[in-house]
Image: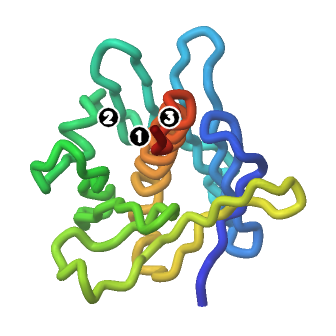
Amino acid sequence: MSIHLLASNNSVRNTTLSCDSMGIHYEVSKSSQTGIVSVHRWESTSNQNVLAGEIEFHWFSADLLRMGDGEWRRRKDLLANEERNPMSRTRTFTGNNGVRYKWKFHWDSLQLCHADRDATNQEALVVYHRHFLPNKPSYLEIRDTSVLPGLDSIIVTFLYMEKKRRDRDKAQRRHGAGGGP
Protein backbone atom coordinates (compact mmCIF):
# COMPACT_ATOMS: atom_id res chain seq x y z
CA MET A 1 0.00 0.00 0.00
CA SER A 2 1.41 3.37 -0.95
CA ILE A 3 0.94 6.66 0.89
CA HIS A 4 0.13 9.84 -1.02
CA LEU A 5 1.34 13.14 0.43
CA LEU A 6 -0.90 15.65 -1.35
CA ALA A 7 0.44 19.12 -2.14
CA SER A 8 -1.98 21.94 -1.36
CA ASN A 9 -0.70 23.87 -4.40
CA ASN A 10 2.03 23.73 -7.04
CA SER A 11 4.58 25.83 -5.12
CA VAL A 12 7.72 24.32 -3.60
CA ARG A 13 8.19 27.32 -1.29
CA ASN A 14 4.70 27.83 0.17
CA THR A 15 2.60 24.68 0.40
CA THR A 16 1.60 21.79 2.60
CA LEU A 17 2.28 18.10 1.99
CA SER A 18 -0.10 15.89 3.91
CA CYS A 19 -1.83 12.57 4.26
CA ASP A 20 -4.58 13.04 6.81
CA SER A 21 -5.34 9.32 7.18
CA MET A 22 -1.72 8.68 8.27
CA GLY A 23 -1.43 11.84 10.38
CA ILE A 24 1.44 13.16 8.24
CA HIS A 25 1.50 16.92 7.74
CA TYR A 26 4.36 19.14 6.54
CA GLU A 27 4.06 22.90 6.16
CA VAL A 28 6.46 24.67 3.80
CA SER A 29 6.81 28.45 3.99
CA LYS A 30 9.21 31.07 2.68
CA SER A 31 10.07 33.98 4.95
CA SER A 32 9.44 37.32 3.25
CA GLN A 33 12.22 38.87 5.35
CA THR A 34 15.05 36.33 5.04
CA GLY A 35 13.98 34.32 1.98
CA ILE A 36 14.64 31.10 3.91
CA VAL A 37 12.29 28.22 3.12
CA SER A 38 11.30 26.44 6.34
CA VAL A 39 9.76 22.98 6.54
CA HIS A 40 7.79 22.11 9.68
CA ARG A 41 6.26 18.74 10.57
CA TRP A 42 3.17 18.59 12.74
CA GLU A 43 3.89 16.36 15.74
CA SER A 44 0.62 14.79 16.87
CA THR A 45 1.83 13.76 20.34
CA SER A 46 2.73 17.33 21.35
CA ASN A 47 0.31 19.04 18.94
CA GLN A 48 3.17 21.32 17.82
CA ASN A 49 5.07 22.04 14.64
CA VAL A 50 8.65 20.73 14.71
CA LEU A 51 11.34 22.13 12.40
CA ALA A 52 12.22 19.43 9.84
CA GLY A 53 14.72 21.59 7.95
CA GLU A 54 15.46 24.81 6.11
CA ILE A 55 16.76 25.84 2.70
CA GLU A 56 18.51 29.08 1.81
CA PHE A 57 18.70 29.63 -1.96
CA HIS A 58 21.43 31.93 -3.29
CA TRP A 59 22.02 33.45 -6.72
CA PHE A 60 25.79 33.83 -6.64
CA SER A 61 26.99 31.56 -3.84
CA ALA A 62 26.34 28.03 -2.64
CA ASP A 63 22.82 27.13 -1.55
CA LEU A 64 22.60 26.13 2.11
CA LEU A 65 20.47 23.46 3.78
CA ARG A 66 20.06 22.25 7.31
CA MET A 67 18.16 19.37 8.81
CA GLY A 68 16.18 20.11 11.93
CA ASP A 69 17.99 22.70 13.99
CA GLY A 70 21.42 21.36 12.94
CA GLU A 71 24.26 23.21 11.28
CA TRP A 72 23.87 24.90 7.90
CA ARG A 73 25.64 22.91 5.18
CA ARG A 74 26.44 23.64 1.56
CA ARG A 75 24.31 21.72 -0.94
CA LYS A 76 27.28 19.80 -2.30
CA ASP A 77 28.13 18.60 1.22
CA LEU A 78 24.59 17.40 1.92
CA LEU A 79 23.32 16.40 -1.55
CA ALA A 80 26.38 14.97 -3.26
CA ASN A 81 26.94 14.31 -6.95
CA GLU A 82 28.64 10.95 -6.42
CA GLU A 83 28.67 10.16 -10.13
CA ARG A 84 31.32 12.88 -10.54
CA ASN A 85 29.56 13.88 -13.74
CA PRO A 86 28.80 17.61 -13.92
CA MET A 87 25.82 16.88 -16.20
CA SER A 88 24.25 14.37 -13.78
CA ARG A 89 21.25 15.57 -11.82
CA THR A 90 21.30 12.54 -9.49
CA ARG A 91 22.10 13.51 -5.89
CA THR A 92 22.90 11.31 -2.89
CA PHE A 93 22.30 12.05 0.81
CA THR A 94 22.06 10.33 4.16
CA GLY A 95 18.61 10.57 5.71
CA ASN A 96 17.91 11.49 9.32
CA ASN A 97 17.35 7.74 9.82
CA GLY A 98 20.98 6.96 8.79
CA VAL A 99 20.04 5.38 5.43
CA ARG A 100 21.72 6.55 2.20
CA TYR A 101 19.30 7.59 -0.54
CA LYS A 102 19.56 9.14 -3.98
CA TRP A 103 17.21 11.38 -5.90
CA LYS A 104 17.18 10.72 -9.63
CA PHE A 105 15.16 11.92 -12.58
CA HIS A 106 13.24 9.36 -14.59
CA TRP A 107 11.66 11.02 -17.62
CA ASP A 108 9.92 13.98 -16.01
CA SER A 109 9.55 12.36 -12.61
CA LEU A 110 11.70 12.77 -9.52
CA GLN A 111 12.32 9.42 -7.79
CA LEU A 112 14.01 8.38 -4.55
CA CYS A 113 15.97 5.10 -4.40
CA HIS A 114 18.48 3.45 -2.11
CA ALA A 115 21.95 4.80 -2.89
CA ASP A 116 23.82 1.60 -2.09
CA ARG A 117 21.88 -0.81 -4.31
CA ASP A 118 22.04 -1.72 -7.99
CA ALA A 119 20.27 1.09 -9.81
CA THR A 120 19.12 -0.95 -12.81
CA ASN A 121 16.85 -3.37 -10.94
CA GLN A 122 15.75 -1.11 -8.13
CA GLU A 123 12.17 -0.02 -7.52
CA ALA A 124 11.64 3.61 -6.52
CA LEU A 125 10.88 4.17 -2.83
CA VAL A 126 9.23 7.56 -3.40
CA VAL A 127 7.94 9.09 -6.66
CA TYR A 128 6.78 12.65 -7.29
CA HIS A 129 3.67 12.94 -9.47
CA ARG A 130 3.42 16.47 -10.82
CA HIS A 131 0.09 17.78 -12.10
CA PHE A 132 -0.73 21.12 -13.65
CA LEU A 133 -4.52 21.06 -13.49
CA PRO A 134 -5.98 22.74 -10.40
CA ASN A 135 -8.49 19.94 -9.75
CA LYS A 136 -5.76 17.28 -9.66
CA PRO A 137 -3.13 17.95 -6.98
CA SER A 138 0.50 16.95 -7.27
CA TYR A 139 1.65 14.41 -4.72
CA LEU A 140 4.59 12.44 -3.38
CA GLU A 141 3.86 8.73 -3.53
CA ILE A 142 5.62 6.81 -0.76
CA ARG A 143 5.84 3.30 -2.19
CA ASP A 144 7.92 1.80 0.63
CA THR A 145 6.99 2.68 4.21
CA SER A 146 10.51 1.82 5.41
CA VAL A 147 11.42 5.43 4.47
CA LEU A 148 9.01 6.96 7.01
CA PRO A 149 11.64 7.32 9.80
CA GLY A 150 13.73 9.41 7.37
CA LEU A 151 10.83 11.43 6.00
CA ASP A 152 12.00 14.81 7.36
CA SER A 153 15.22 14.76 5.33
CA ILE A 154 13.45 13.22 2.34
CA ILE A 155 10.93 16.09 2.25
CA VAL A 156 13.59 18.81 2.63
CA THR A 157 15.83 17.33 -0.08
CA PHE A 158 12.82 16.71 -2.35
CA LEU A 159 11.82 20.39 -2.15
CA TYR A 160 15.38 21.42 -3.01
CA MET A 161 15.64 19.01 -5.96
CA GLU A 162 12.22 19.96 -7.35
CA LYS A 163 12.98 23.70 -7.08
CA LYS A 164 16.23 23.19 -9.01
CA ARG A 165 14.45 21.07 -11.65
CA ARG A 166 11.89 23.83 -12.15
CA ASP A 167 14.63 26.46 -12.38
CA ARG A 168 16.41 24.40 -15.04
CA ASP A 169 13.20 23.84 -17.03
CA LYS A 170 12.42 27.56 -16.87
CA ALA A 171 15.91 28.47 -18.09
CA GLN A 172 15.64 26.00 -20.97
CA ARG A 173 12.29 27.45 -22.05
CA ARG A 174 13.65 30.99 -21.79
CA HIS A 175 16.69 30.16 -23.91
CA GLY A 176 14.78 28.16 -26.51
CA ALA A 177 16.00 24.64 -25.80
CA GLY A 178 14.59 23.40 -29.10
CA GLY A 179 16.56 22.70 -32.24
CA GLY A 180 16.24 24.49 -35.52
CA PRO A 181 18.18 26.23 -38.26
Q: Which amino acid does label 3 sit on?
A: Asp
**Residue farthest to the front?**
181
Q: Where is residue 5 in the image (x, y as percent from the top left)?
A: 65, 65
Q: Name the residue under label 1.
A: 68
The relative height of residue 150 versus residue 57 in the rendered view (above or below) is: below
Q: Nearer the viewer, mark 2 or mark 3?
A: 3
| Tag 2–tag 1 contact (CB < 8 Å) | yes
The relative height of residue 111 versus residue 75 in the rendered view (above or below) is: below
Residue 126 appearing in the image: yes
Q: Which amino acid does label 1 sit on?
A: Gly
Q: Position of residue 112 (x, y in %)?
A: 39, 67
Q: Where is residue 165 in the image (x, y as percent from the top left)?
A: 47, 44
Mark 3, Cα crowd under 10 Å, few <14 / some 14-19 / many 20+, is few
The residue drawn where x is 63% and y is 39% is 28
Q: What residue type is labelled 2?
A: Gly
The relative height of residue 53 versus residue 2 in the rendered view (above or below) is: above
Mark 1, Cα crowd under 10 Å, few <14 / some 14-19 / many 20+, is some
Q: Nearer the viewer, mark 3 or mark 1?
A: 3
Disc 3 versus disc 1: distance between alpha carbons?
Answer: 25 Å
Disc 2 versus disc 1: distance between alpha carbons?
Answer: 5 Å
The residue drawn where x is 58% and y is 42% is 40
* Along the line of sight, the residue nearer the viewer: 95 or 14: 14
